[in-house]
Amino acid sequence: MIQEKSTKMKFPYFFQQILGFLTVITILMIVSVVSLVHFGRNTAIQETENRLFGYAESIVEENLASEQLETIQNVLLKQGVSFYVFDVEGTLRYPELPPDIEARVVPEHIEQLESGQRLALTTEQEDMLGNPRETAFVYLPFFQQSDETYAGFITVSSPVSQIDRQMDVLRSNLFNAFLLSTILAILMSIIFAYYQVKRVNRLRKAAHQVAEGEYTIQLQHKERDEIDQLSRDFNRMVTVLKESQEEVAKQEERRKTFMQDAAHEMRTPLTTINGLLEGLEYDVIPEKQRLRSIQLMRKETRRLIRLVNENMDYENIRSNRIILNKHFIPLEEIMDEINEQMNELVKESSNQLIVEDMNALRVYADYDRLKQILVNLIKNAMQFTDEGLIIIRASKKEHGTQISVIDSGIGMTKEEIQFIWDRYYKADVSRVSTTYGESGLGLAIVQQLIALHKGTVEVESELNKGTAFHLYFPDSDNIPFE
């Protein structure tokens, strides 16, 4: 007893979709918030430094007079801005400090300032309570008006705590926006994931129905995305499976019919052979009839061998287990051989076989298989023709040769033409003859051999007027028929 293993769904596709959407949105929001805060802070500090440089330029324009510096200092202190004036040696000149305190800047700054460069720094300092405080400093060099020599520099500073407060407010607003966006993103993700999963489940349900043997399912699609393309391909797959199942059922039905026919055909010669052997064994057959009995057994044996060989030959051809030895064959040569081989058979059929002038034509084919093709078609023509004509003609075509087998027999309808290449098919069971072939494999073998030659076969037929088979053989394996 076979037990199905229960499979747990580890992580449903629905939640995979939601997680994927949320992950992308979360990463995008975090990167956006961090980038925006970083950019806003840098921009604010840059604006503060530009403002401090503006103050420094204004101080230089006042010629650094003590009275004016005091006034400027009072105005700037109200804005939280302080400034210092250093001489050429880097010693503080304004404001004045107690004698025991000396303020200087590091030499590397002086070297940059002497070259005329402006400097802007942001550092952490302790306030009066000992708390760290970030402060922006700008350094602006000034020069003697007489000879433009370096005379010192001005330092202007301002705390950037206000910028940090603004950034905190910005972070808070962005965080609130992030929460709101996340909630909306979850809702949209659920809706979109549900829609996508619903489409996938529709495919899954349809696939399950096909697995149960339902081949009439067709999914609606609008060619919008890959799922729609998958639905389209699914529909094609179902159509092919349906056709395959129908073909299998049809072939199975024909196989059963053939097996019944073959059993019937084999039973008759086997019964005949068995009866004759018993007669010979018990000496009930007169001496004069023994030779004929042996000949009859040989005839029935050949009939059985022919039936078996045709089936084996068809299977070998269909399975590509034969190798063609193709070369250019003179048609006159092969037709002379076929004409001689089938001479007695043609006489018995009351038909007339006419081989038209081949005009030294050659055909690129395997000799034995080409002969098999033509013999099968001629026998087929004789089977469905009474006291008529069977004509073989050939002509040169572009990149190939065409051979036609034409008869004046009973012909076929368009519906019958569609099935003549099917294995075991018999267009008219009442006209089946063991002389010309009884298995229903002759035309199926012809079609397979033509395909192996990379050629084509066309059929023209009119009921009660005859049938024509037109075979095309290309002159090379690389030339397709057009």
Image (cartoon, rainbow, N blue to C red):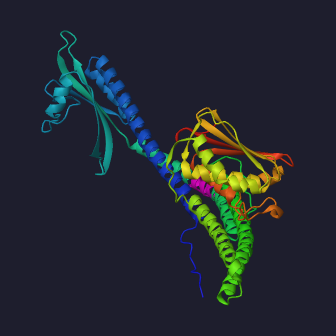
Q: Residue at x 35, y 29 (%)?
A: 52
Query: Magenta segment range?
Result: 179-189
| Residue toward you, 93 or 210 | 210
Secondary structure mostly seen in the magenta stretch: helix
- Residue extending furthest toward the front: 288
Q: Is residue 445 left or right of residue 92?
A: right
Q: Residue at x 44, y 43 (%)?
A: 35
Above/below status of 473 relative to 431: above
| Residue toward you, 64 or 126 | 126
Q: Is residue 452 left or right of residue 391?
A: left
Q: Residue at x 81, y 48 (%)?
A: 388
Viewer can see residue 369: yes
Above/below status of 445 relative to 76: below
Asked whether 160 falls inside the magenta stretch, the response is no
Place of residue 301 in the rendered image (x, y in percent of width and height, measured from the top left)? 64, 72
Q: Is residue 152 left or right of residue 7?
A: left
Q: Quadrant of residue 315?
A: bottom right
On the rendered image, what quadrant is the C terminus found in?
A: top right
| Residue toward you, 252 or 474 | 474
- Residue extending furthest toward the right: 464
On the rendered image, what quadrant is the N terminus found in?
A: bottom right
Place of residue 362 in the rendered image (x, y in percent of width and height, measured from the top left)? 57, 38
Q: Is residue 241 left or right of residue 37?
A: right
